[in-house]
Amino acid sequence: MHLFLSFLKLGATAFGGPAMVPFIGKMAVEQRKWLDGGTFRDGVALCQMIPGATAMQVSAYVGFKVRGVAGAAASFIGFGLPAFLLMVGLSAFYVRSQKLPSVVSVFNGLQTIVVAIVANATLSFGRTSLKSLRDGMIAVIAAVMFALKVSPILVILSAALSGLLLMGKNSAPDLGARPETDSGSTRPFLIIGSVAMFLLAVLFFWERKLFDLAVIMLRIDLFAFGGGFASVPLMLHEVVEARSWMDDRTFLDGIALGQVTPGPIVITATFVGYMVYGIIGSVVATIGIFLPSFLIVIGIAPTLSRLRRSVHLTGVLGAILCSFVGLLFSVTLRFASGIAWDIPRALLAIAGFIALLLNIEIIWLVIVGTVVSIIFL
């Protein structure tokens, strides 16, 4: 319960996604003294190399090191619960008020802010991932493939194959040299996985749309390497292009609402679930978008020292991250093409992009963008 309440409090103010990792470290290492600094850094390195939202995974890692799988679940749920509850409330408000003139004005402005946010994410990915001409070519090919409506999962798999063939000789990442001997997570891992499979079977026979929603979110989380923003092109493809559950503008509104909530951008899955199947849909989508990465954390953490020796894994992950630069670039162009640009919107987008370059927190950007939208749009 102490772990749950500590991460619940932290999750209620967790604006900025990966930017929350240092705050988790401060609480776990300096304030609570649950872990030493080296163990925490090893966990951060692990969470950066596996799919899913980094801050959520780090919270699970800390809980796992403190109290095993039960601790991982307590900290993971506590950290994500405030964002989930707030997003459900915002989604319900959106459904009931989206046609009001003032609400339309707000979202017209926030959509330009989202373009700036995704553009900044593209730039950040590019700075950290593109280190050679070969990296740039992978990104360009990924952007072209996505623009041609190739499934982003196929794009990622193609990039992974190229990384295996072309980048396998890169040095392995420094994940720490501490041996891990804890094998107590195997049985809980299997139990949670089995329960998840059983519930999927129930959804399959009870309501196929909920089953499809769950499978989509599970798949997105499994392929979202590089943090929460990596899920955006995957989710866009699945819910807008492949199934037409909503249009581009509604999806943009969902991302905008996700920036109002604490927690990672993948909380947009809660909005998607609500729009598809109400409260039940939001629960199913949220569990789906977080469960795989949670299982990966508790499954891989005990074998962390072995991962650092895999040079092939290094090449594959490097190429996948390069492909996400291209995917995010294509998403930025697509979102921008759907906006009716005028001078106020252009200025708002430019100001938002500059603010992000200056490391201003996204929540303040959204608040200012909301006020400007009400007054000028």
Image: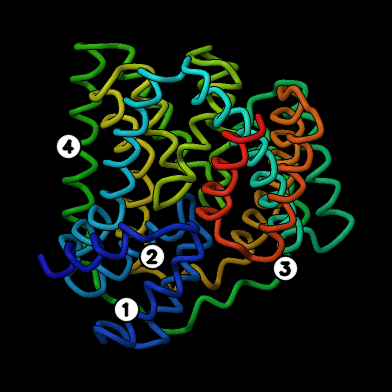
Residue at 29% of width from left, 23% of height from top? 281
**What element does badge 2 sit on?**
helix
Q: Distance between the residues labelled 2 and 4?
A: 24 Å
Question: Badge 4 local density, few (<14 within 10 Å), some, or many (20+)?
Answer: few
Question: Badge 3 local density, few (<14 within 10 Å), some, or many (20+)?
Answer: some
The mark closer to the camera, 1 or 2, is 1
Residue 116: where, in percent of width, then height? 69, 44
CB within 8 Å, label 4 to label 3: no
Q: Name the residue under label 3.
A: 170
Q: Which of marks 3 and 2 is nearer the N terminus?
A: 2
Q: In this view, does 374 lie to the left or right of 266?
A: right
Q: Which of marks 4 and 3 is nearer the N terminus?
A: 3
Q: Which of marks 2 and 4 is nearer the N terminus?
A: 2
CB within 8 Å, label 1 to label 2: no
Name the mark on residue 195.
Answer: 4
Vertical placement of residue 79 versus 201, above or below: below
Amino acid type at mark 2? Val
Name the mark on residue 27.
Answer: 1
Amino acid type at mark 4? Val
Residue at 45% of width from left, 45% of height from top? 260
Amino acid type at mark 3? Asn
Amino acid type at mark 1? Met
Q: Within the image, what quadrant is residue 309 found in? A: bottom right
**What element does badge 3 sit on?**
loop
Residue at 85% of width from left, 54% of height from top? 134
